[in-house]
Amino acid sequence: MAQVFPRQANDFARASLVIGGVVAAAVLGSFFFVWPRSSYMTRQKEARSQPVPFYHLHHVGGMGLDCRYCHTSVDKSAVAGIPPTKTCMNCHSQIFKDSPTLEPVRASFRDGTALEWVKVHDLPDFVYFNHSAHVNKGVGCTTCHGPIDKMAFVWQEKSLLMEWCLECHRAPEKYLRPRSEVYSVAWQPPSNQLELGRKLALDYGVQTSTSCSTCHR
Amino acid sequence: MSHENLPASPVEFEGVRRPGAAARRRYWKSLDELAKTPAFMDFLHREFPEQASMFEDEKGRREFLTLMGASLALAGLTACTKQPEERILPYVRQPEALVPGRPLFFATAASHDGYARGLLVESHEGRPTKVEGNPDHPASLGATDSFGQAHVLGLYDPDRSKAVLYLGQLRTWGDFRAALREPLAKLKAKGGAGLRFLTGRVTSPTLAAQMQELLQSMPAAKWVSWEPVSRDNTRAGAVMAFGEPVEPQYRFDQADVILSLEADFVSGHPASLRLVREFASRRRGGSELAAMNRLYVVEGSPTLTGASADHRLALRSSAIEGFARAVAAGCGLPASGAVAHDWVAPLVKDLKRAGSKALVLAGESQPPAVHALAHAINEALGAIGTTVSYTAPAEAQPGGETAALAALVDEMRQGQVEMLVVLGANPVYAAPADLKLVEALDKVPFRVHHGLTVDETAGRVHWHLPASHPLESWGDLRAVDGTATIVQPLIAPLYHTLSEIEVLDAFARAEGTPKGYDVVRAHWRTPLGASDFEARWNRALNDGVVAGSAFPAKAVKARASTIPAPAAAAAASLEVAFRPDPSVFDGRFANLGWLQELPKPLTKVTWDNLALVSPKTAAELGGVATEQTARGHVTEVAELSLDGRTLKAPLWVLPGHADGVVTLHLGYGRTRAGQIGNGTGFDAYALRTSSAPWTASGLQVRKTGETARIACTQDHWTIEQPEHQQAHERHVVRSVTRDELAKDEHVVHKLGHVPDPGLSLYPPVEYKGHAWGMTIDMSACVGCNACVTACQSENNVPVVGKEQVARGREMHWIRVDRYYAGAPENPETFHQPIPCMQCENAPCEVVCPVAATVHSDEGLNDMVYNRCVGTRYCSNNCPYKVRRFNFLLYQDWDTPTFKMQRNPEVTVRSRGVMEKCTYCVQRISRARIDAKNQGREMKDGDVVTACEAACPAQAIVFGDVNDKTSRVAKLKADPRNYALLAELQTKPRTTYLAAVRNPNPEIPGASGQDERHG
């Protein structure tokens, strides 16, 4: 019987084994390594709509409000604190007091029911992050939260994956800034950032730990 | 095993019967261990017997593969899910002083049997989550007991009463007030004739004043206060000795020699926490050895007080009076009816030597004459003024509680009671059986019950009113020394409930909505002074005590002459002793899972009460067959009958129990406690009478042939000894006498062999920063279990249920191992709390395939739940057996109120995850971040673990071992300090201070006496 397949068919067969293996590895690899890091999974850079169109762009970028006017506990507590409706009404009982956009805020203040904000930066429940430990050691707000003054609806600037946390915990000097600049949205790392960072780490007694119980308990 | 042959085959227990050091240093946990039964060995070697065969229905191979394949695929898919979107709900108006994410602590008090225990309650954004003791409160000194810890669970108990009920039907408070108006008006017109109030013990000044006011407006009405665990004998004894019902206030820190006549001051006294602190202060490591106190205990039913004694005499309750009379006679008092005992002469000598520094105290279970004798002996010794003083009693109606209840029942039976208002009591369940309260109650035409749960009494009244929990209501309480505390709420009532004060206000005033806050404030306006009232009120709320409110000492003179001659000795029949349960007390805590699952300090039994007997009595009953299986202990059930009343109870042999007595613990067999407490144990109240509430003779015991399954943890997590033949070889427990330690400082270290620490395969690790460590002092530890419940509360440790406990799957991160030494008839008892040892060379870490347990740079053995895949290799490799595995989904993820209870700082673990003690790493983190934010170094005492905070004896000390000035570093340098299984080179960070006992060599059979020679 004549040969059905030419001689090169063997090479094709061998090559297809290799290619198939590579493709399978790529698929599996992307499933385990690329997919979880994708912005689809982390929701990185995805601006999220909120019950009230609160614009950081306007309040921070335009008017220059300090972060701590609203996020009062950021330097005292694990959580930065979402402001109570009262904080909104400090101004909005005078400014735009009849704006239909602000009706949910007024309704909340009137009825005593909380506004339900969508949580943008949502760490898994087994992670215990502490804001105060970071801002008091020279980690600026924008280092993690990005250009908040340019955001209308807030998005999550960084991946918030553990590898991202560790990047800084292993080399904090890359990110530290003087305490006076922590709440600055205009801060840009200087050209001698590493030098400055090392000095600040020493001055502030920064001891980043990568032990599991630093964040997990 | 079978205990039937126990006394008949001394060979079996020969090792512990030999006199001398070898026997004294041979420690054992159970009779099964002594006998090395197969079931015990199974538990020892396998840790979880039958753990592999979880499926009750046998699955075939194919079915298994199908299930496993599906679970593998599903497990992979979980990685594909995104986190669900969460919402943030900020305040509308944020309360002052509240910083989101930081807990606030409020000082308040909780009643234990009427008396205040000061608390500091932790509140997370308005949710009370954890109870601590109030250091400024005289009955707490910063410590709590298990009951105190469990208050927070009581608040969130889903079985709490939530609405007003009329004959079981939902009603409103308005309906009740409308229904009350007419009958109350009729009664008022008659001056209150036919109106009766029944409350628990009342120390609340406001409530007492309200009652007085009511009784003044209706002079013919009556108020009865009654507790099933009464203090009638204590009060009657004081009246006998002094002519008035004074309260003895003990000062254990002043006492050199203490004789307890069945007084369980460790767990059964209103000031237990303070007394334990004072008692332990003269025993713990670091205290002066020469100043060590000595405790003699004479008791029938083994208690924690007896377990802490240097000398314990097991005498049945009824025989103690004769002993007390002999001691009194020895102290030169005219006491007839003395019964000679070879202890008396050396004991009296010791008491006299201590003189004014001696203290004799009598327990509530002893008749008034014994109390009066104790007062008289104290006076004869000159102890009044130093070790004991007397004040007015804290309760509004001292003494005579049982008699008052009996009189009330009599009136009810004769139809003289037209309206009965029960506030915070549960007489249908707990009243003495001979009163036949239920049939009398049914004759009352208008019955009201106010309580936390729809309990047995609620089921037999017309109107049931839901009560506010103490953590959600305003009130006040007095501690046993008279110190008043304003009880302030931590949270608004979860349901439509009112407090006792508010309900009583409704009886006083026909109109208006009562507000507890207003009533309490109005009451305190006078005592706090009209000028500066606001400042003083705020100060009292802040401190948790009203300054200067303790009662002054009274000058009293004891009269021995008024003590009557003893009654004719009862016939030598079997006795029954009724005692409050160590876990659920009189039954009021029966629906709290934390307490039900708490292994009782001596029996280590959970979820049940038992008929406890001594080994000898068991033999006289024809033996008690208790078989240990992998699903719990199976023990024989007996029918107990007393004066024609019967009940069925499982028999249990308890080492150290007095012969000829059966001990029954109250608080079980409840029918309307709730889903946790219903149907656990048996109701011992069924045999209890008003005339003999503590001890009765004439008990008949007949074995029924039935068996009961008991979940007992005493052999769980037993640290393995080589071959388990020479229990003393590894010296897990070390105890020495004071004289031994005085003679040779290093005696504790000589008990074990520790190889050179350099002999390790692992390179040494240097800890440069903090190095966390802990010491646990076995001299101070009284075994009260407060640490276990505190840990459970702090660390979100689940309750698993009786069936799972029986399989050895209880989840407690810290357990208290109870060891005996000596013969089972009257052994010495030692308590050894075992949390994770946080080994520097941790055997668990090297075997974890997924690095879910790794070392931190401060020496903690971290457990990473989100990495754990549940291989259980770590648990298998832990020589201390401190790791706990979630075999099932033990945590209640659904009940909304339980979600409010959890500590938000600690992960709530799910099924299939290993967990263990972390040294409260959340508290370390909090303290570290606080210190750094304040720009300072952490100092000793900044981190207090939950177990350490709760401990009344201050036996647990935590701190930085690298800080040589810290308390823990100093204790680790103490010659009493030793590590468990140090020869394994695990380098545990948790170490122990050996138990030091202070026996009197002159006492016959004293355990220490033959030590002097060898």
Image (spheres, helix red, strand yellow):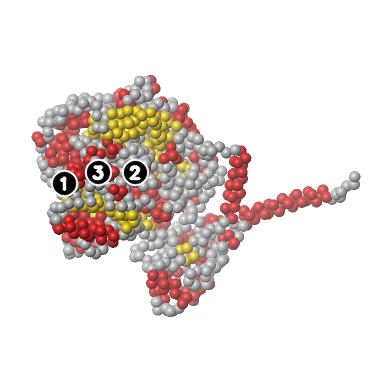
Relative horizontal placement of residue B538, taking residue B552 as reference (left or right) = right
**Residue drawn at x 54%, y 61% as measured from the top left:** A174
Question: Disc 3 vs disc 2: which is toward the camera?
Answer: 3
Residue B578 located left or right of residue B592 = left
Which disc number belongs to residue B404?
Answer: none
Up/down of B528 relative to B707, above or below: below
Question: Which secondary structure, mark 1?
Answer: strand
Of the numbered discs 2 and 1, the one sitting upstream in the chain is 1
Label 1 crowding class (10 Å Cα cut-off): few <14, some 14-19, many 20+?
Answer: many
* Dot 2 alpha-carbon crowd within 10 angstroms: few under 14, some 14 to 19, many 20 or more: some
Q: Nearer the viewer, residue B321 or B192?
A: B192
Q: Residue at x 51, y 64 (%)?
A: A120
Residue B634, how many percent across, how many down? 41, 32
Quadrant of the rendered image containing residue B724: top left
- State the CA–CA distance, disc 2 to disc 1: 40 Å
Do badges 3 and 2 share one subunit? yes
Q: Quadrant of residue B322?
A: top left
| On-image quarter of the N terminus of chain B | top left
Residue B996: percent from the left, percent from the top?
31, 34
What secondary structure is found at the residue carrying circle 2?
Answer: loop
Q: Is residue B75 visible?
A: yes
Name the residue that disc number 3 marks.
B439
Indicate which disc residue B671 carries.
2
Question: What residue is disc 1 on?
Answer: B391
Q: Nearer the viewer, residue A166 or B907?
A: B907
Query: Up-down: is B660 above or below B847?
Result: above
For badge 3, the amino acid type reads Glu
